[in-house]
Amino acid sequence: MWKSFAVLAAVIGGLSGCASMNAVDNDVSSYSQWTPERKPGPYVFERLPSQQAQYKRQDRLEAAARGALALAGFAEVPDPARADVSVQIGARIERYDVALYDDPLWWHGGVFGYGRYGRRGFWGPGFMAFPYDNPRYDREVAVLIRDKKSNQVLYEARAANEGAYEGDDRLLAAMFEAALKDYPQTGVNPRRISTQLSSSK
């Protein structure tokens, strides 16, 4: 029975891994004061002082967001005087450890036993097959678009997800794309939006 269960778990894990390599599901919230007659135009990135201090990290985030802004119809310009809007972006990735016994599924199936040092996780009697602390990552990106002249906030959007890996630039790009997917409209907050990961590394 344990062997069959292990094979099934491996198959499910493999399928989940394949899916996660191609697409990512995001919980998106957006808020808009964008008028219907206004069209997306030239923009410049705006950095907070803290973001200026961490310029290498911010360079990476801006590179990940450029594709999503282009898909939404915006065009980056080098001269702030030519920009119609300014764009602020940010990202948060937090790691936390999940104990297997946090899931109530595992409280009643004989998965746990008691040994010399208390509760232990195991597959079958008498041996440990895995550590029960597993890292998980909360990930979130944010986009704030302001009118360059008035400094009025025109559009705000966030995309969040979580998973077993920290993620890379492709994941950040897919999350920014999700955040701006409905621009200039909004929708139910939060709502689930799936975006594809790029094939390039």
Image (cartoon, rainbow, N blue to C red):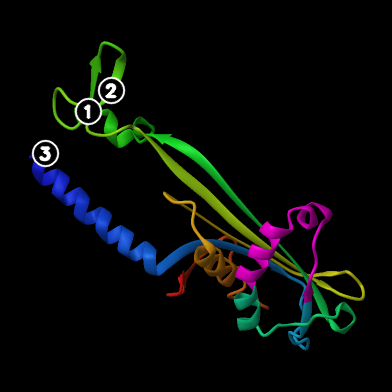
Residue 51 lies within the magenta run: yes
Residue 187 in sight in this render: no
In the displayed structure, 24 sits above or below 115; it is below
Q: Does residue 106 appear left or right of residue 176 in this picture?
A: left
Disc 1 marks which amino acid?
Met
- Where's residue 172, x and y in %? 55, 63
- Where's residue 39, x and y in %? 75, 87
Residue 68 lies within the magenta run: no
Q: Which residues are magenta?
A: 44-65
Q: Mark 2 or mark 3, which has the lower sequence index? A: 3
Mark 3 lies on residue:
2
Q: Residue furthest left?
A: 1
In the displayed structure, 164 sits above or below 170; it is above
Residue 120 is labelled as: 2
Task: Give the spatial CA distance, label 2 vs label 1.
Answer: 8 Å
Q: Residue furthest top?
A: 116
> Which residue is found at the position 43% from the left and 41% from the top?
135
Residue 128 is labelled as: 1
Secondary structure mainly formed by the magenta segment: helix
Judge the density around disc 2: few (<14), some (14-19), many (≥20) Cα neighbours within 10 Å. some
Q: Please, what secondary structure does the residue beneath circle 3 have?
A: helix
What count of labels does the image hold? 3
- Where's residue 163, x and y in %? 44, 51
Disc 2 marks which amino acid?
Arg
> Which residue is found at the position 83% from the left and 81% from the top?
84
Tags 2 and 1 touching, CB below 8 Å: yes
Q: Does residue 177 appear left or right of residue 89 in this picture?
A: left
Q: Mark 3 or mark 1, which has the lower sequence index? A: 3
Residue 1 is labelled as: none
- Where's residue 49, x and y in %? 83, 54
